[in-house]
Image (cartoon, rainbow, N blue to C red):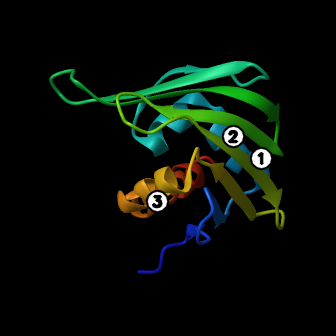
Amino acid sequence: MERKTKINAEEDKQELLITREFDLPLELLFKAYEDPEIVAQWMGTKVIKLENKKHGGYQFETSDKEGNVLFSANGTIHEFLPNQRITRTFEMENTPFPVQLEYLEFEKLTDTTSKLTMHIVYKSVAFRNQVLQLPFAQGINMAHNRLQEIADRLK
């Protein structure tokens, strides 16, 4: 099956350009990134904090059934323009990966479709390439598929 989330990784650049078109109105796509309950559902993680404002922050955590933390991430929100743009940092805790910078742009295509463009900047080409060696592409595509499914129920 073709992945709907497209990842463009140009040679020798420390960035990724990720795009995905959704069968969702712009406001609903943005809400899926803004509402902690919806974020938790499509990301499959616990949202500990989500402060949607300039200088706000967020923290996500996933644990196993015994309560052991398997994944923890956090960041600072630098820009938050509803239905337009979120600029934030992203840091996976307890990994060798340094903080990355993410520019999320939300675009209305029609009254019922929208597009997300994520421009992610890494500290180095080497770190970006390490991320691409992980099941990153499959994971983000699966998460976006869940986002579409969950938001469909909210229409």
Secondary structure, mark 2, is helix
Secondary structure, mark 3, is helix
User: Which mark's residue is nearer the viewer, 3 or 2?
Assistant: 3
Amino acid, disc 1: Glu
At x 58%, y 68%, the residue is 9
Residue 83 falls left or right of residue 9:
right
Residue 73, how many percent across, how many down? 46, 30
Task: Give the CA separation, mark 1 to mark 2.
Answer: 6 Å
Q: Residue furthest left?
A: 66
Task: Give the CA separation, mark 3 to mark 2.
Answer: 31 Å
Q: Is residue 132 above or below residue 102?
A: below
Residues marked 1 and 2 touching at CB (< 8 Å): yes
- The residue where tag 1 is placed is 27
- The residue where tag 2 is placed is 31
User: Which mark's residue is nearer the viewer, 3 or 1?
Assistant: 3
Residue 110, how many percent across, how many down? 83, 67
Amino acid, disc 3: Asn
Residue 14 falls left or right of residue 143:
right
Q: 10 Å neighbourhood of mark 2: few (<14), some, or many (≥20)?
A: some
Question: Image quarter for residue 69?
Answer: top left
Report the disc number at residue 19.
none
Residue 122, how many percent across, how many down? 59, 47
Task: Give the CA separation, mark 3 to mark 1.
Answer: 33 Å
At x 41%, y 80%, the residue is 1
At x 40%, y 40%, the residue is 44
Q: Earlier in the sequence, mark 3 or mark 2?
A: 2
At x 75%, y 19%, the residue is 55
Report the disc number at residue 129.
3
Secondary structure, mark 1, is helix
Q: Is residue 139 above or below residue 98?
A: below
